[in-house]
Image (tube, helix red, strand yellow):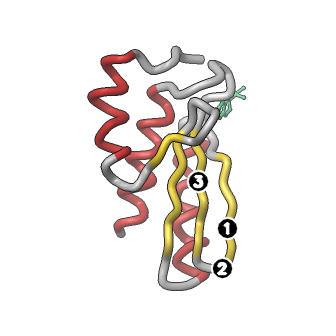
């Protein structure tokens, strides 16, 4: 359990993500990103690496995969909105997607 992101945290931790391919989801306090990979194995490998961190941090993405595309939505269900667990997981996912 944590708290919804404060206005200050939205400026310091959310904005950099919004400049790096993440976007607010319409009608929800949630962020979304579409990752494109070379092929299915790269996409599924990314999901496997993310899943290990998600489980370790007990924070789980809403996501789907079609061939080499992975769609990710992050929000914190327990606070019904964005928390620092979402920005932390988003940064990790961006790192894992890079290599
Ligand atoms: C009991 C357990 O800690 C909760 O169900 C966790 C698990 N993973 C979660 N993931 C996300 N995205 N939001 C949550 O509120 C959440 N809660």
- State the mark number for residue 72: 3
On the rendered image, what quadrant is the N terminus found in? top right
| Residue 10 vertical position relative to residue 49 in the rendered view, above or below | above
Work out how far the residue at label 1 is from the one at label 2, CA to CA, in angstroms.
Answer: 6 Å
- At 30% from the left edge and 27% from the top edge, which residue is drawn? 11
Whether 41 is drawn above or below 82: the answer is below
First-in-chain label (3 vs 1): 1
Which mark, by number, is residue 67? 2
Which residue is pictured at 47% across the width and 42% down the height? 89
To which residue does mark 1 refer?
A: 65
Ligand 1 location (quadrant) = top right
**Residue at 41% in and 60% down:** 96
Label 1: which secondary element = strand
14 and 39: which one is in front? 14
Q: In this view, does 13 lie above or below 89?
A: above
Where residue 69 sits, quadrant-wise, is bottom right
Real-space CA distance between mark 3 and mark 1, rounded to the nearest whole angstrom = 9 Å
Q: Which of 75 and 57 is in front in this view?
A: 75
Instruction: Left or right? Give the position of 3 relative to 9.
Output: right
């Amino acid at each position: 359990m944590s708290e919804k992101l404060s206005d200050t945290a939205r400026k310091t931790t959310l904005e950099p993500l919004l400049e790096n391919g993440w976007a607010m989801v319409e009608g929800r306090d949630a962020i979304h990103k579409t990752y494109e990979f070379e092929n299915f194995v790269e996409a599924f490998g990314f999901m496997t690496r993310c899943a290990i961190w998600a489980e370790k941090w007990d924070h789980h993405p809403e996501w789907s995969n079609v061939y080499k595309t992975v769609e990710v939505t992050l929000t914190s269900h327990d606070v019904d909105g964005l928390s620092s667990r979402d920005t932390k997981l988003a940064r990790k996912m961006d790192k894992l997607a890079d290599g």
